[in-house]
Image: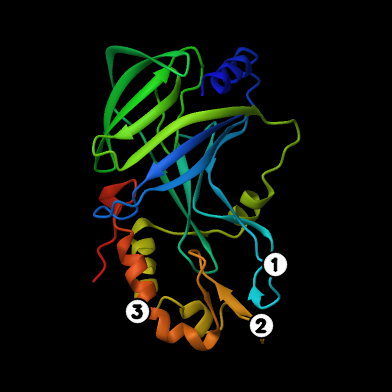
C-alpha cells in the first residue's frame, strides 16, 4: 500500500488532469449475509469529465456458450466538468443501459481528526448520503475534489471511505496516468445507446424483471443462437429450455440484493 501511494503522490505532483485512481471496494449485497463482495473500481479524472466504473472480465471460450472473451460493463457514472449533475448509467440485466441525470451533493462536516493512511496525512469528514452515514478520510496533498461513486466536494482526494455500518468500504490502492488519446470505448458505446429514464421508471423496470427474470430471452428481444447457452452474471449456464424452471431461483438472487449503496433507493420486491 505505502509504495503504491508514493507512486500516487508522484502522479499528483505532476498533475496532468488525466489520472486514474483505483479503489478496492468491499461491500455486502445482502444486508443479512456475512458474504463480502470484493472488486476494483476505477475513478478516471480527465479534463473533460469524471468517470467511475467497474469492468468485470468474463472469459467464455466454450462454443456451447452464448458469449465471448470480453469485458462486461456494470452500471457506471459520468460527470461532465462543466455540469453539477452525474449521469448514472444503470444496467439491470436486460439488453439496455438506462440513464438518469441527478445531482449528488454532500454536506460534509470536516473534523480536526488526522491519521496516516498509506504514508499520507489524511483528515476525517462525515456526511449523510443515500440513507447512510459516511466517514471519509481525504488528503489535501492530492488536489482532487472527488472520491469513489458520487462522493465529491472535499478539498482533496478521498483515500478511504466507509459507512458506519461497514456495509461498504473503499480505499485507494493504486493510481496511474491516463495516456493522451485514451478512449473509453466500452463506456462510450453504452452511453450512445442508453435510454433516458426517471428513477420511478427504473424501479418499475426492476420490478418487471423480478416478475419475469428472463423475459428478454423468452420474448425474443435477446436471442440465444441454436445450440448455444446463456451465461448468467454469477456463472450459471442455462439452455433456453432451462430458463423457465430457473425463474424462481433468479428471483431469489434479485431479491437478495437488498443493500445498494444508496439505501434509500432500494427496491421493495414482493
Q: What residue sits right under mark 3 in the picture?
A: 248
Give the answer, above or below, for where 60 lies relative to 16. Answer: below
Image x and y of residue 162, in percent: 33, 34
Q: Nearer the viewer, mark 1 or mark 2?
A: 1
Nearest the camera: 55 or 200?
55
Q: Residue at x 65, y 69 (%)?
A: 67
Left or right for 252, reference 59: left
Give the answer, above or below, for where 147 lies relative to 30. Answer: above
Q: What residue sits right under mark 2 in the picture?
A: 225
Location of residue 239 (image quadrant): bottom right
Q: What residue sits right under mark 1 in the picture?
A: 61
Q: In what element is the residue under mark 1?
A: loop
Can residue 78 be seen here?
no
Contact (Cβ within 8 Å) of mark 3 with mark 2: no
Image x and y of residue 199, in percent: 36, 56
Image x and y of residue 259, in percent: 30, 52
Q: How is the image coloured?
A: rainbow
Instruction: Choose the circle earlier in sequence order: 3 or 1.
Output: 1
Nearest the camera: 210 or 61?
61
Left or right for 66, reference 53: right
Callout 3 environment at 10 Å: few (<14), some (14 to 19), or many (20+)?
Answer: some
Amino acid at each position: 500500500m505505502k509504495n503504491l501511494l508514493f507512486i500516487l503522490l508522484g502522479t499528483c505532483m505532476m498533475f496532468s488532469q488525466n489520472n486514474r485512481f483505483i479503489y478496492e471496494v468491499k461491500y455486502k449485497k445482502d444486508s443479512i449475509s456475512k458474504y463480502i463482495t470484493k472488486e476494483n473500481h476505477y475513478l478516471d479524472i480527465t479534463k473533460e469529465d469524471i468517470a467511475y466504473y467497474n469492468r468485470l472480465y468474463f472469459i467464455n471460450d466454450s462454443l456451447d456458450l452464448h458469449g465471448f472473451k470480453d469485458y462486461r460493463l456494470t452500471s457506471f457514472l459520468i460527470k461532465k466538468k462543466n455540469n453539477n449533475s452525474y449521469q448514472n448509467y444503470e444496467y439491470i440485466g436486460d439488453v439496455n443501459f438506462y440513464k438518469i441525470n441527478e445531482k449528488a451533493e454532500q454536506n460534509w462536516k470536516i473534523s480536526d481528526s488526522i491519521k496516516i493512511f498509506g504514508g499520507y496525512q489524511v483528515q476525517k469528514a462525515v456526511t449523510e448520503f443515500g440513507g447512510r452515514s459516511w466517514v471519509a478520510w481525504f488528503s489535501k496533498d492530492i488536489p482532487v475534489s472527488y472520491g469513489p461513486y458520487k462522493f465529491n466536494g472535499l478539498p482533496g482526494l478521498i483515500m478511504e471511505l466507509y459507512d458506519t455500518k461497514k456495509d461498504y468500504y473503499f480505499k485507494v490502492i493504486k493510481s496511474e496516468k491516463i495516456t493522451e488519446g485514451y478512449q473509453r470505448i466500452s463506456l462510450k458505446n453504452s452511453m450512445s445507446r442508453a435510454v433516458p429514464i426517471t428513477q420511478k421508471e427504473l424501479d418499475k423496470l426492476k420490478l418487471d424483471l423480478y416478475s419475469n427474470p428472463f423475459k428478454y430471452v423468452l420474448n425474443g428481444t435477446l436471442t440465444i443462437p441454436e445450440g448455444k447457452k446463456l451465461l448468467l452474471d454469477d456463472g450459471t449456464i442455462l439452455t433456453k429450455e432451462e430458463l423457465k424452471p430457473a425463474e424462481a431461483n433468479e428471483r431469489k438472487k434479485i431479491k437478495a440484493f437488498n443493500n445498494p449503496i444508496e439505501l434509500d433507493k432500494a427496491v421493495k420486491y414482493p
